[in-house]
């Protein structure tokens, strides 16, 4: 297992994770997930999200996110796992996130000032960031986990496509990662449910093989 996404992973309540409400309770819930799961996932990356700005107050929300990560990152390190904060696509603003660019995630990590706190780079979430490749090359040491899929104009939050079937420049991003020194895991993360052509309705083993082949082809084309 290379990554874990606990049931409660946002610093403040979000649309998908509305409870518990209090900051202390959310920290306790994440800590409990770490203590329960780290033993069966040694070395894994535990993903976090900020959640949305509470009542539109991004300043307060970011302060809460800094506190959240300062509390849980040392626990993760003591248990032999790592944390990685994930900036989400702007379509998740006001629902799941208050950061949506690579640079914002770097700033949050630097403000937190905790050794070992990393960044989860999901290509579906970040490919429209115009400074993404520059960010990867300049802060590649912060990237803890890579998640890949492809894009079409989504019909829902569960409408991702296979690598190589949309506009995400996967090959260029893979080369930027390699140049930055990244050698971690590459996770195919495809959500596809509740749409007429759901990829979940097909052969999932074949889907994984197709995406692995597509990653190799993207690398070769970009080279």
Image: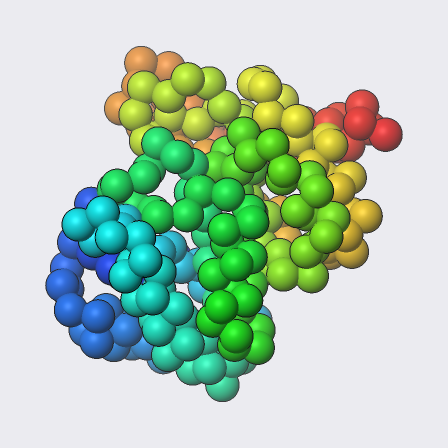
Residue 61, given in percent of the width and then of the height, sits at: 29, 59
Residue 218, given in percent of the width and then of the height, sits at: 73, 27
Residue 176, given in percent of the width and then of the height, sits at: 75, 42
Residue 220 placement, left or right of 25: right
Residue farthest along the bottom direction in this orientation: 78
145 in relation to 117, above or below: above
> For residue 22, which quarter of the picture?
bottom left
Q: Nearer the viewer, residue 166 or 195?
A: 166
At x 50%, y 43%, the residue is 101
Residue 166 placement, left or right of 170: left
Residue 36, visible in the rendered structure:
no
Residue 53, visible in the rendered structure:
yes
At x 34%, y 66%, the residue is 63
47 in relation to 99, above or below: below
Q: Nearer the viewer, residue 34 or 24?
A: 24
Q: Which quadrant holds the C terminus?
A: top right
> For residue 160, which quarter of the picture?
top left
At x 56%, y 49%, the residue is 103
At x 80%, y 23%, the residue is 221
């Amino acid at each position: 297992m290379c990554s874990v996404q606990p049931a409660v992973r946002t610093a403040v309540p979000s649309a998908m994770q509305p409870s518990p409400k209090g900051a202390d309770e959310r920290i306790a819930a994440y800590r409990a997930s770490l203590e329960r799961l780290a033993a069966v996932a040694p070395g894994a990356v535990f993903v976090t999200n900020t959640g949305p700005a509470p009542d539109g107050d991004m300043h307060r929300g970011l302060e809460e996110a800094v506190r959240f990560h300062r509390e849980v990152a040392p626990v993760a390190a003591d248990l032999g796992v790592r944390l990685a904060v994930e900036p989400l696509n702007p379509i998740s603003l006001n629902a799941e996130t208050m950061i949506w660019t690579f640079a914002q995630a770097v700033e949050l990590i630097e403000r937190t000032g905790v050794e070992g706190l990393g960044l989860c780079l999901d290509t579906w979430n970040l490919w429209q960031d115009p400074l993404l490749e520059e960010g990867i090359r300049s802060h590649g040491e912060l990237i803890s986990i890579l998640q890949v899929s492809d894009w079409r104009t989504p019909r829902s939050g569960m409408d991702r496509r296979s690598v190589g079937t949309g506009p995400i420049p996967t090959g260029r991003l893979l080369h930027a990662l390699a140049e930055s020194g990244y050698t971690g895991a590459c996770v195919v993360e495809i959500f596809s449910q509740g749409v007429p052509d759901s990829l979940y309705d097909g052969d999932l083993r074949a889907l994984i093989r197709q995406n692995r082949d597509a990653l190799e082809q993207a690398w070769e084309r970009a080279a």
